[in-house]
Amino acid sequence: MQVKNRIYDGTMYIILSGELDEHTANFVRDEIDRLVGAKKVKQVIIDLSELEFMDSTGVGVMIGRYKKFKEKGVPVFISNPSTHAERIFKITGLYDITPKIN
């Protein structure tokens, strides 16, 4: 699992690459928190185009990041979901709290 990032004009773009499951959840959670905590950002866009797999643990990571950033007033959006991620987000209703943008 890789967590890549870049910042442009106050927006942090985070790209998740690989599998987000029970084996990688702690790493992803800690890495996203570290990245966003280290910089002052207006919003976070999580790019899921390279996400190959996500299980219920990954869903928990996404919900946890949403709650943490909401407390800080930082909106979170999803972009470019892989086919698998798109299905998971629709089934679980995650798009209700982290909208998809183009």
Image: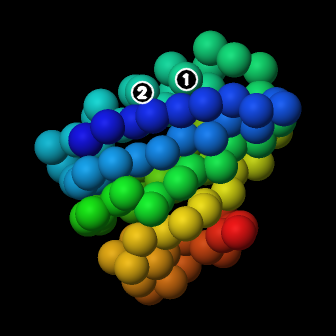
Residue pictured at 67% horizontal, 57% vertical: 77
The C terminus - image quarter: bottom right
Q: In which quarter of the image is residue 2?
A: top left
Q: Which residue in the structure is indicated by mark 1?
A: 35
- When the figure is inspected, residue 29 is found, relative to residue 77, above or below; the finding is above
Secondary element under disc 1, as helix, strand or loop, is helix
Q: Position of residue 51 (x, y in %)?
A: 35, 59
| Along the viewing direction, whichever of 96 and 7 lies nearer the viewer | 7
Secondary element under disc 2, as helix, strand or loop, is helix
Q: Which residue in the structure is indicated by mark 2?
A: 31
Q: Position of residue 82 (x, y in %)?
A: 41, 71
Say whether residue 47 is visible: yes
Residue pictured at 82% horizontal, 31% vertical: 10
Residue type indicated by callout 2:
Glu
Q: In which quarter of the image is residue 24?
A: top left
- When the figure is inspected, residue 37 is found, relative to residue 95, above or below; the finding is above
